[in-house]
Image: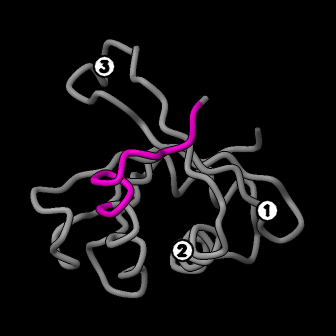
Amino acid sequence: MAPLNDPVRLRAYRNALANWRFKGFIRWTEQALRGLHQELEASTAAEVARLMHEYVCAGGNIDEVPETRAEWSHHDFHYDFRIEVEGKRLYIETRLYFDDPDDPDDPWIHVVNVHAP
């Protein structure tokens, strides 16, 4: 897995994460929310979104993974986090959506899966 280094996609991703506290910038599938609640008892989706933002601000990597699964073939990549929350390692799989990476209010992230690595 390679870190997300493309400057355009990385800027878009960071813009979406910077808006973690506002509705619509980090969206969660039902599957991801179920996984989050299975793995963690106390953390909310908003808390994990904040931790994702802090992780990237502190220099943490987002893995950019070429998408090979047929059901997601309309995406070139998915983006993975491996972070610690409540003392537990989590794998968080996301998708990135944007039209204008420089518009801080345009990009958004879809969290599609959460589980222990």
Q: Earlier in the sequence, mark 3 or mark 2?
A: 2
- Identify residue type, mark 2: His
Q: Quadrant of residue 59?
A: bottom right
Q: Is residue 54 magenta?
A: no
Q: Is residue 74 left or right of residue 17?
A: left
Q: Residue at x 66, y 61 (%)?
A: 60
- In the image, farthest residue toward the right: 87
In the rendered image, the quadrant that contains the C terminus is: top right
Q: Which residue type carries mark 3?
A: Glu
Q: Is residue 3 magenta?
A: yes
Disc 1 residue type (three-letter)? Glu
For disc 3, the marked residue is 71
Q: Residues within 10 Å of mark 3 (few under 14, many from 20)?
A: few
Quarter of the rendering containing residue 87? bottom right
Q: Is residue 46 left or right of residue 96?
A: right
> What secondary structure is found at the residue carrying circle 1?
strand
Between residue 105 and residue 45, name the one nearer to us.
105
Q: Quadrant of residue 22?
A: bottom left
Disc ID at residue 84 = 1
Point out the stretch of residues depicted in magenta.
2-12
